[in-house]
């Protein structure tokens, strides 16, 4: 009889634990979906936004420490000023969230330890802005140019925040860094296959997420 009672007690504990974990996952999923929806509402030039909160358990850890380990926000595409950025990725470490809002399934960011962001400016976007006789092929670490005057272009980002591509003494491209709400810091740029990758790091909550606290 004692063995049966012990089995029943263990079964009840297991049900409570599984039920609690299930509810925690549902609440985390709701917060992720709400965060993605609010980011899209604040940044209407962006689509394909997804958010992921890396914390297990979600609510219990948040209530005890006030923080989650990491929040990731991705977007398929942003079109600030008619310039298309693709594959945007924001990674936030040691994120302090509002616990009261979290209980309601809403992720409101109070502070972060650090953050990183990257976004790609595609090769086609660059070629559409070059003089007609030039075509650039972006490879890992370099830009190979087809056209008069040379074969390899030099890339700089000016102090004024302009992407400049030059070959010899000629400027092929002079384009402002796209002003996207998901690109909250002045980026550096590197060549990757078929894209110019913009990336930077920051320690303050991006304005886009700060605005969510007031939404």
Image (cartoon, helix red, strand yellow):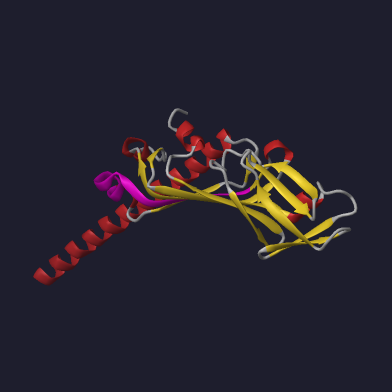
Relative horizontal placement of residue 209, taking residue 127 as reference (left or right) = left
Q: Residue at x 65, y 38 (%)?
A: 45
Q: Residue at x 76, y 52 (%)?
A: 166
| Vertical arrangement, residue 87 with respect to residue 146, above or below | above
Residue 145 x, y percent position in the rendering: 81, 60
Relative horizontal placement of residue 151, taking residue 93 as reference (left or right) = right
Viewer-closest of 200 and 92? 200
Viewer-closest of 13 and 97? 97
| Vertical arrangement, residue 145 with respect to residue 36, above or below | below
Q: Could you tell me if residue 90 is visible in this image?
A: no
The residue positioned farthest toward the front in the image shown? 169
Q: Which residues are magenta?
A: 60-76
Viewer-closest of 206 and 172? 172
Q: Residue at x 86, y 48 (%)?
A: 131
Relative horizontal placement of residue 8, taking residue 122 as reference (left or right) = left
The residue positioned farthest toward the left in the image shown? 2
The residue positioned farthest toward the top in the image shown? 214
Viewer-closest of 52 and 204? 204
The quadrant of the picture occupied by the N terminus is bottom left
Residue 118 x, y percent position in the rendering: 57, 52
Residue 215 x, y percent position in the rendering: 47, 28
Residue 86 x, y percent position in the rendering: 66, 51
Residue 194 is covered by the magenta coloring: no
Relative horizontal placement of residue 175, taking residue 5 as reference (left or right) = right
Across the whole image, how many numbered discs are drawn on residues? 0
Q: Could you tell me if residue 92 is visible in this image?
A: yes
């Amino acid at each position: 009889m004692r063995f049966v009672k012990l089995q029943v007690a263990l079964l009840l504990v297991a049900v409570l634990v599984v039920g609690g974990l299930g509810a925690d996952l549902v609440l985390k999923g709701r917060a992720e979906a709400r965060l993605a929806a609010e980011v899209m509402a604040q940044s209407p030039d962006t689509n394909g936004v997804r958010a992921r909160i890396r914390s297990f358990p979600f609510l219990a850890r948040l209530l005890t420490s006030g923080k989650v380990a990491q929040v990731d926000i991705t977007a398929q595409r942003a079109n600030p000023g008619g310039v298309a950025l693709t594959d945007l990725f924001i990674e936030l470490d040691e994120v302090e969230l509002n616990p009261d809002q979290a209980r309601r399934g809403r992720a409101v960011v109070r502070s972060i330890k650090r953050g990183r962001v990257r976004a790609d400016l595609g090769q086609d976007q660059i070629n559409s802005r070059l003089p007609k006789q030039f075509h650039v092929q972006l490879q890992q670490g370099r830009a190979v140019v087809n056209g008069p005057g040379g074969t390899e272009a030099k890339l700089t980002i000016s102090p004024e925040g302009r992407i400049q591509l030059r070959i010899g003494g000629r400027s092929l491209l002079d384009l402002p860094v796209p002003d996207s709400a998901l690109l909250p810091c002045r980026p550096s740029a590197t060549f990757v296959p078929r894209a110019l990758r913009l990336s930077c790091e920051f320690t303050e909550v991006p304005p886009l997420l700060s605005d969510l606290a007031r939404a």
